[in-house]
Image: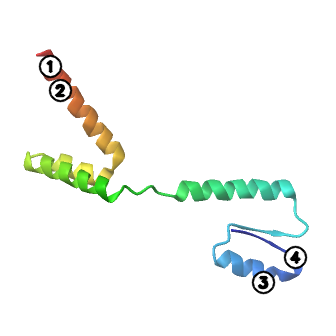
Amino acid sequence: MITINSGDQISLSIEGMKLGVFDDFLMPLDLDSLISRIREAYQAKKDAEVVKPSLLQRCQDIMVAASFAEAGEAEMAKELLTKGRKSKENIKNSIENEKNERRKK
């Protein structure tokens, strides 16, 4: 949120900032500065959003990790559950590379 106040209501600006207002502008304001701060606020909100995996995806991840654990690969299972998507891509690539090596033999 961005607030716009007149100069005689500084107490409202301070209260807004305490409550988490992204920025506060006093009248008269520079429109280009306001537009710039709106863009920055949007980007900050976008960067703060975390995409959570669906329940189905989480259950699939747990089942895959359990399979690794049963096969004696406890560290791989732990990494899969704790490090997320990047780790999954690395594991998938490792498995594909191993399959390709077996085919060559």
Query: Furthest residue to the front?
Result: 56
Residue 19, image x and y in percent? 64, 78
The kind of secondary structure element at disc 3 is: helix
Give the labeled residue for mark 3. 11
Give the labeled residue for mark 4. 6
User: How many C-alpha atoms fall within 10 Å of the one at disc 3: few (<14), some, or many (≥20)?
Assistant: few
Residue 69, image x and y in percent? 12, 50
Task: Give the image's coloring scheme.
Answer: rainbow
Which amino acid, by three-letter code, is at mark 4? Ser
Which amino acid, by three-letter code, is at mark 2? Lys
User: How many C-alpha atoms fall within 10 Å of the one at disc 2: few (<14), some, or many (≥20)?
Assistant: few
Quick check: marks 2 and 1 in contact, CB under 8 Å?
A: yes
Query: Furthest residue to the right?
Result: 28
Q: Earlier in the sequence, mark 4 or mark 1?
A: 4
Q: Earlier in the sequence, mark 2 or mark 3?
A: 3
Which amino acid, by three-letter code, is at mark 1? Arg
Label 1 vs label 3, nearer the camera: 1
Q: CA distance from mark 4 to mark 2?
A: 68 Å
| Residue depicted at 61% across the width and 57% down the height | 44
Give the labeled residue for mark 1. 103
User: How many C-alpha atoms fall within 10 Å of the one at disc 1: few (<14), some, or many (≥20)?
Assistant: few
